[in-house]
Image: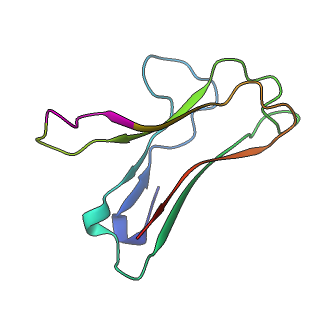
Amino acid sequence: MSAAGGAVTHSGDNKDGAGDGDDETIKLELDNLSADIKYVVFVVTAHNEGGSFKYVSNARAQLRDLTPNDPKRDKKVISSIAIGGHKDHSALILCALIR
């Protein structure tokens, strides 16, 4: 799934969490993002029975810098939030990028 002329891509919904590594990823290529887009907000939502994070115990959302060809910045965590234990909330704002 992609948006903004391909500057934003989503890996798809992993409903069972099986496998190693990140279950779902969103890739944002800032250099390819149209200049008229001033805000990008990353929101994590719960799509489960009951529609909340109440029974989520060990999930985490992270924003990472994946600048290519820069070993000092590769996978640097910019923002990280534990999703589990957020009671009846159905959405969490991870971060907002503003130009």
Quarter occupied by residue 32: bottom left
- Residue at left offset 74%, top offset 40%: 47
The magenta region covers 71-77
Residue 50 versus residue 15: which sits nearer the camera? 50
- 76 within the magenta span: yes
Quarter occupied by residue 66: top left
Give the colour scheme of this rendering: rainbow
How many marks on residues?
Answer: 0
- Main secondary structure found in the magenta portion: loop
Name above or below for residue 27 compared with residue 22: below
Q: Position of residue 31 (x, y in %)?
A: 25, 65
- Residue at left offset 17%, top offset 44%: 68
- The answer to whether residue 82 is left or right of residue 36 is right
- The answer to whether residue 34 is left or right of residue 91 is left
Q: Position of residue 28 (x, y in %)?
A: 37, 55
- Residue at left offset 67%, top offset 30%: 83
- 75 within the magenta span: yes
The quadrant of the picture occupied by the C terminus is: bottom left
- The answer to whether residue 10 is left or right of residue 75 is right
Q: Position of residue 59 (x, y in %)?
A: 62, 24
Quarter occupied by residue 78: top left
Q: Position of residue 44 (x, y in %)?
A: 64, 44
- Residue at left offset 45%, top offset 43%: 11
Q: Residue furthest bottom?
A: 36
